[in-house]
């Protein structure tokens, strides 16, 4: 039987008020020995504001692209873009309000004017979430300046949870809003050779230039960086929740070392760059695959999308105990374009199954593309990007999990390697 979803994000349970008070008291006792460093750093603040600007800029870019399609007398694609913008943001607003209500299930609702703002602006809920995350971080910094380390820890944990929530909302928006728009515009670009990308007479904007710029901007910035942000925040939030469970069982980290959630949850620069390359190649391969299919059989594009979406939805629903039906559907849409971690534990079987499905689908699309579009200008280039991106993404995925993962000593491959070494060392010598 499925368990009830957590009060906050799908992977982070809300601590009880008694536990929060206990943590605060413990930290105040330890504060007299040595002043800890400020947890809410300038880098955390920069990430929040840059993410907020990316969301606003991405939304404005989509709306402008929609208006360009209307101006170029393409109402079908224009209305498609419009609903691709509207529906994911409505879902994000619904989930945001649901999380707000669940977070206040243990405490009475306060500040009615704040709730009026949350309800009125729920279609653009990520903006409010980013502001909430920054406010928690700002209060954590103020508490640190006043040497109130218990309050600092409490507010910083609130910042981490808010960041994980907004990263999850952005992830869904990225792949249910941006990815379909990228596929549509990339398919239109592939249909004609670059020599025919000329501005139509009497139209101010060059639609081909708009599409090409939109595809590059979304792939290189919005979509890939959104996945990196989600994986970073989600890993921190999950290890924070896991450390709470360990503290509840009486296993405390020595004061001389960093907490477990910092040692295992914070990604290094090398890890984040590796994840960026992995996701950039993988997402590029996936949008190219669907764009190639759209060129040869646009009216049947919904068939592979619905079939694979259904497979991933059922997979996630039965694999992740805390995942509700609607969240499983949302992450099923994410899995159309990228693999992200939705549950703790070893990921080797999930990754293997995901890439078996992906390469199988790529082979089918390659056959259709070669048969129905043999004379297309991008015939060989399309196949190279589709398969090369998938293989390159898989290589960077292995590099991340084998050498860049913060908890790589517990990775399945490293555990098997250590077991083989121990067996080789314990093997009796030949007399």
Image: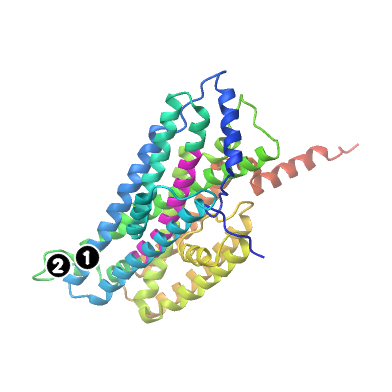
Say which residue appears at 47% left-offset and 48% top-offset.
164
Question: What element does badge 1 sit on?
Answer: helix
Is 288 positioned to the left or the right of 268 in the image?
A: left
Q: Magenta region, mostly helix, strand or loop?
A: helix
- According to the picture, the residue beneath numbered tag 2 turns out to be 199
Is residue 42 depicted above or below 310 in this figure?
above
Residue 49: where, in percent of width, then height?
A: 33, 42
Residue nearest the viewer, comparing 296 with 332: 332
- Magenta-colored stretch includes residue 177: yes
Tag shown at residue 208:
1
Q: Residue 423 is drawn in which quadrant?
A: top right
Residue span colored magenta = 156-182
Question: What element does badge 2 sit on?
Answer: loop
Is residue 241 something one can see in this rendering? yes
Residue 324: where, in percent of width, then height?
A: 55, 64
Which residue ends up furthest to the top in the rendered image?
Answer: 33
Residue 99: where, in percent of width, then height?
A: 48, 55
- Looking at the image, do the residues carrying marks 2 and 1 touch, with CB atoms under 8 Å apart? yes
- Dot 2 or dot 1, earlier in sequence: 2
């Amino acid at each position: 039987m499925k368990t009830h979803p957590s009060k906050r994000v799908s992977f982070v349970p809300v601590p009880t008020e008694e536990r929060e008070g206990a943590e605060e008291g413990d930290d105040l006792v330890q504060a007299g020995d040595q002043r800890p460093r400020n947890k809410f750093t300038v880098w955390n603040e920069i990430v929040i504001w840059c993410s907020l600007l990316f969301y606003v800029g991405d939304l404005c870019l989509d709306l402008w692209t929609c208006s360009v399609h209307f101006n170029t007398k393409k109402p079908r694609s224009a209305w498609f873009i419009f609903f691709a913008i509207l529906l994911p943001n409505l879902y994000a607003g619904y989930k945001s309000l649901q999380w707000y209500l669940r977070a206040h299930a243990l405490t009475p609702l306060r500040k009615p004017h704040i709730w009026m703002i949350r309800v009125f602006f729920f279609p653009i809920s990520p903006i409010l979430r980013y502001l909430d995350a920054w406010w928690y971080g700002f209060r954590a910094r103020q508490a640190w300046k006043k040497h109130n380390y218990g309050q600092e820890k409490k507010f910083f944990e609130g910042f981490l949870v808010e960041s994980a929530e907004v990263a999850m909302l952005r992830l869904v928006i990225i792949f249910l809003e941006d990815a379909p728009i990228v596929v549509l515009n990339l398919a239109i670009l592939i249909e004609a050779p670059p020599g025919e990308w000329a501005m139509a007479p009497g139209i101010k904007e060059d639609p081909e230039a708009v599409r090409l710029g939109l595809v590059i901007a979304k792939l290189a910035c919005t979509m890939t960086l959104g996945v990196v942000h989600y994986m970073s925040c989600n890993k921190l939030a999950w290890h924070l929740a896991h450390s709470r469970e360990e503290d509840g069982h009486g296993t405390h980290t020595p004061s001389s070392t960093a907490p477990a959630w910092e040692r295992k949850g914070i990604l290094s620069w090398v890890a984040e760059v590796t994840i960026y390359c992995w996701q950039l190649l993988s997402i590029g391969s996936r949008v190219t695959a669907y764009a190639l299919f759209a060129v040869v059989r646009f009216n049947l594009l919904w068939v592979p999308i619905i079939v694979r979406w259904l497979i991933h939805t059922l997979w996630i629903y039965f694999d992740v105990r805390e995942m509700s039906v609607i969240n499983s559907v949302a992450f099923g849409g994410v899995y159309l374009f990228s693999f992200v971690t939705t549950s703790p534990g070893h990921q080797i079987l999930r990754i293997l199954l995901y890439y078996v499905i992906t390469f199988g689908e790529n082979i089918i699309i390659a056959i259709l593309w070669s048969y129905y579009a043999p004379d297309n200008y991008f015939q060989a280039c399309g196949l190279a990007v589709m398969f090369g991106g998938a293989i390159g993404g898989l290589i960077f995925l292995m590099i991340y999990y084998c050498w860049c993962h913060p908890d790589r000593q517990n990775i399945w491959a490293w555990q098997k390697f250590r077991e083989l070494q121990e067996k080789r060392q314990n093997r009796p010598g030949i007399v």
